[in-house]
Image (cartoon, coloured by chain):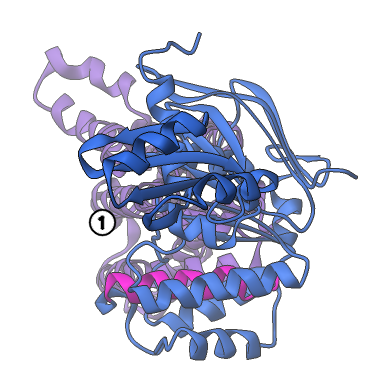
Chain colours: A blue, B purple
Amino acid sequence: MDHIIEITGLTKDYGDARGVFGVDLAIKPGEVFGLVGINGSGKTTTIRHLMGFLRPNAGHCSIRGMDCWRHAAELKRGIGYIPGEVAFPDVKTGLDFFRLQAGYLGIRDLARVHELMDRFSLDASAPLKRMSKGMKQKTAIVAAFMADAPILLLDEGTTGLDPLMQKAFTDLVREEKAKGRTVFMSSHMFDELEAVCDRVAFLKEGHVIEVADVSQFSGNEPVKEYKIEFTGPADYQTFLSRSATVSRRQENLNQVTVQTADQDITALFTALSDLEVRFITQVPKTLARHFIEKYQETEGQSHV
Amino acid sequence: MFSIALMKQTIRENISLWLVLTVVQCAMIATIGLTAPIAAAGVAYYNLLPGIFMGIYAIAIGNKLVSAKIDRGTLAYVLSTPVSRRAVVATQALFFAGSLTLMCALTTAVHSVAAMLSSYGADTAEVLIIVRLNLGLLTLALAFSGICFAASCVFNLSKHTIAIGGGLICAFLLAPIIAMFGDNFAFLHNLTIVTLYDVTDIMASAAGWVWRLVALAGIALATYVAGAIVFTRKDLPL
């Protein structure tokens, strides 16, 4: 089996251009796959299809070769899930909730629950109704990971968490990846996805406009961008006459931005060797920048 | 087919209303049973109050069993486990029908025992009538619950479930009362399922009372099944 999660031509039309349209995604076993997009771009709708809550208008999704709609219950044996909107059942405390879920899942040993609670410094003996948003989210995280499921579907897993806990979450996802788990997670925060994902799909108005390989970003891009400032206009002009890859010039600052492939870096230094440089800095291409560019490229295009 | 874990949770969530209604009904029926034979006080009681009690229970619990779980989103946590939709709907239906059956069984027992212990000392024929009246009441309650259950399975919002399911039950309960206002309203008798539970006919063992109860049971079965089918096939906005 090549792909553990397959989404083919998934379409759910809610009218007024809301929904998802012809989404194709294929996730390999052991991969951490991110889904990013602004609010209402179709992230949650996609995950709800994988959970078997929604039936596609067209196309289909499968996990381990089984249709997500028809085999919804069977598939849940191997899926941990954080809902986009967490709503706890009518039980008193967080612990009661974990016990209830353990009952549905057929889990007897709650050691993993306690381990996860420690990790997120969660006091689950507090009444659910009085929990803060962050505590509720932590409770949802523990519930998703308690079964040690091989597949994790995490819809906005870090909503409401403070930066420290966001890091704890990221670390947990990395650990799960090391154990060979497959993770499909959505977020509207690029940093979070960049930190853990192997690949990230960018959704816009229900369409996948790009699937990016995260290893190509933030210092690993094969063609890097450098900003160079010269001490005077003479050197600035000399450099411009030598280099063809200048993508941006700021004459008043004597600054240029160049695109240089890693194998051409020596040529860049040779060109700079007899010039007076005030500074040279690499401008990392982040996922966020990449997607903002893509977003702007597609702006105004229709998706028919 | 059923989920034991869900059944336990459903019982925990709904036991209080069931207890209150059961205790109140048992207390009332015990008082009636102890004081007067069925022919005297029984008719008035069975004609009026239990239907309303069952209606209240059906509307409140019907909404809580399915619709409210979708509306609040808590169903996501049940369906994120290997519990199938079919098991969810079957478990909730079993609780609904089962709790009503138990309620009616208890009131039957209380009424019968009270009647036998009373000063007039009910005989077997009288107890048989009590059992039949409660059996009829049960079929009416099941029909009510089926209607509310179907509404609960169809609608994703509690307000719609209560408006449609609850509205129908209220209309059914009010129709015979309005019909008493005169001949112009007599047609309302034919527009309500409440008249299928005919207390006078049951007491007189008149022809047709069994078939009317079968009709009520048929309504119950059809609405439960229809609700279950809709629930297993529809999109859930969880």
Residue that lies at the very extreme toward the left in this rendered image: B181
Location of the N terminus of chain B (image quadrant): bottom right
Residue at 56 percent across and 90 percent down: it is A114
Q: Amino acid at mark 1?
A: Ala
Q: Quadrant of residue A134?
A: bottom left
What secondary structure is marked by label 1?
helix
Q: Position of residue B141 (x, y in %)?
A: 42, 47
Q: Is residue B38 above or below residue A244?
A: below
Q: Magenta: predominant secondary structure element? A: helix
Q: Position of residue A298 (x, y in %)?
A: 43, 20
Residue at 41 percent across and 86 percent down: it is A122
Q: Is residue A38 above or below residue B51?
A: above
Circle 1 chain: B
Q: Quadrant of residue A145?
A: bottom right
Towards the viewer: A256 or B74: A256
Residue A135: within the magenta? yes
Residue B74: within the magenta? no
Q: Quadrant of residue A30?
A: bottom right
A21 horizontally vs A122: left or right: right
Read off the residue under disc 1: B40
A96 horizontally vs B55: left or right: right
- The magenta stretch is A132-148
